Image (cartoon, rainbow, N blue to C red):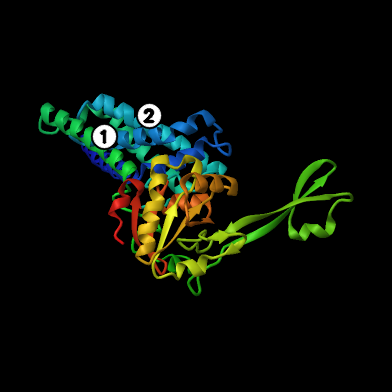
Amino acid sequence: MKYLVHFSRIFVGILFIISGLIKLNDPIGFSYKLDEYFGPTVFNIPFLLPFTLALALFVVILEVVLGIMLLVGFKPKFTVWSLLLLIVFFTFLTFYSAYFNVVKDCGCFGDALKLTPWESFTKDIVLLVFILILFFGRKHINTLFNEKFATITSIIALFASCFLGYYVINHLPVIDFRAYAVGKNIQKGMEFPDGAQKSEYEMIFVYKVNGVNKEFGEKDLMNLPQGATFVERKDKLIKEGYVPPIHDFSLEKDGSDYTTEILNEEKMIFFVLYNLEKSNIEALTSLEVFHQKAKAKGYKVIALSASDEKTIAKVKQANKFSFGFYFCDGTTLKTIERSNPSIVVLKKGTIVQKVHYNDIDSVNL
């Protein structure tokens, strides 16, 4: 039991630290996952939505600190109880996601490692087993070196985690695991390799029969009940094939698609403003000045937003913007960049530089 506890202690501690640090590198991305869980399609807890970033920070810092506390043996009873409660909570979330197929990726390892809902649930079950071993064998968890070392290490871990969280929120993730990282080419990210398996779908037709909606397959259409009224058609995924890293990027303006034209520009700058109503007001005032500097250097500058035309017109007038706005999906824009607004520099579709609005003066023109 002693050796089993020691192995479990190392395994659980390291895994919690790695998982926590990956999410702490990008807490805003993890908060988007919490938005999904608290949204109307899952648990429908709207009053928690304004606090998702704070909750995301709390959870990921707790993961890192508990992992370190376990390794150094600081307050083992409190640590093991906290780990047990945390893993039970995570296991419930991943099971719910997998069973009801509501959240496709739990975000356990951020964008660094994508897990299916059932893979996430399996991972949590394995962790639960090892944490139960720690729980029942916690008398074998001894302090590493001495109590003073364990205390100081745990306190340093707490403050270092808080600092990292503060830094990445006010700047950008230290490591970018997304498909839009610096050096990535958007056109190549959208390519579908020759011979790659395509996703298979089944068409499901919904008809209202005697006041009740019923689903029918293609083969059933020949024998529809009399008086059935068509409601909608749904595409049911049968087998998922290859999905390009970038599969939802498009730029539209006035009903026309300008994606190819813009991505072929030699010197291009995007202002990413996925939601103008939530954009930092002070940062917005600096965009036009930066636009004029970039324009003088030969750059074409545009803004990408998912906001409606009325909101765009209002913000353009208030800030005297002279650059054009193009529509892009809001989820895509949140994936490209975490700050709102942010600046992305491209050369023929290849991302050269990305900065938070707090670092706009550091953009290399």
Mark 2 closeness class: few <14, some 14–19, many ≥20 residues within 10 Å: few
- Residue 170 in percent (x, y) is at 32, 42
Would residue 83 appear left or right of 251 to someone viewing this image?
left
Mark before the other along the chain sequence, 1 or 2: 1
Asked whether residue 324 appears in the rendered view, the answer is yes
Q: Amino acid at mark 2?
A: Leu
* Residue 340 percent location from the top left of the image: 42, 46
* Residue situated furthest bottom in the rendering: 194
Above or below, 36 against 134 in this view is below
- Residue drawn at (56%, 48%), measured in percent from left and top? 313
Which residue does the image show at 53% across and 50% down from the upper left? 306
Q: Is residue 25 left or right of residue 114?
A: left
**C-alpha separation, residue under disc 1 versus residue under disc 2:** 15 Å
Q: Between residue 326 and residue 164, name the one nearer to us.
A: 326
Q: In the rendered image, which quarter contains the C terminus?
A: bottom left
Image quadrant where residue 12 sits: top left
Q: Which residue is mark 1?
A: 65
Dot 1 crowding, Cα within 10 Å, few <14, some 14–19, many 20+: many
Please name whichever residue, 288 or 24, is drawn nearer the observer in this view of the structure.
288
The reply to whether callout 1 and callout 2 are in contact (CB within 8 Å) is no
Q: Is residue 24 visible?
A: no
**Helix, strand, or loop for circle 2?**
helix
Q: Camera-side residue: 202 or 162?
A: 162
Where residue 301 appears, as percent x and y from the top left, is: 43, 60
Residue at 28% over, 38% down: 64
Q: Is label 1 in a helix, a strand or a loop?
A: helix
Going by the image, does 261 lie left or right of 168?
right
Say which residue label 2 marks: 85
> What type is the residue that disc 1 sits on?
Val
Q: Position of residue 23 (x, y in %)?
A: 35, 44
The quarter of the picture where the N terminus appears is top left
Q: Residue at x 76, y 46 (%)?
A: 214
